[in-house]
Amino acid sequence: MAATGSTRCDPPCGPEVACRNFGNGSSLCVCPHDASPPTPDGKCPQRRTESLAPRPILHIIPPSHGNSTLANATSTALVS
């Protein structure tokens, strides 16, 4: 699954695999997660999938009121 003298992989890489272009005009099909070569049937052995349902983001720390950058910007705007 490699191509030479082209900016696209020929044959196309497949739905799980990306075409990586090199500066010398060659390209190579690679798995996007770890740049490993795909299996002969065009799949990535180390697949990483995400669920379709959104998940909450845990451990969000809200900004403190003592943020000096915001405090300086606000006080400067009020003084002007």
Image: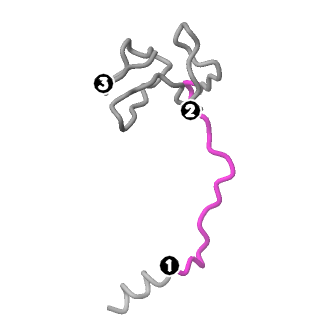
Q: Position of residue 42 (x, y in %)?
A: 52, 12
The local secondary structure at tag 2 comes to loop
Q: Pick out the residue farthest to the bottom.
A: 79
As drawn, the label of residue 54 is 2
Image height of 56 relative to 76, above or below: above
Q: CA distance from mark 1 to mark 3?
A: 50 Å
Q: Earlier in the sequence, mark 2 or mark 3?
A: 3
Q: Which disc is residue 6 wearing? A: 3
Q: Nearer the viewer, mark 2 or mark 3?
A: 3
- Residue located beneath label 1 in the image: 69
Q: CA distance from mark 2 to mark 3?
A: 39 Å
Q: Residue at x 33, y 31 (%)?
A: 25
Q: Is residue 44 magenta?
A: no
Crowd tier of the residue under label 1, counting other residues whose Cα lies within 10 Å: few below 14, some 14–19, many 20 or above: few
Provide the secondary structure element on which disc 3 rests: loop
Q: Which residues are magenta?
A: 51-70
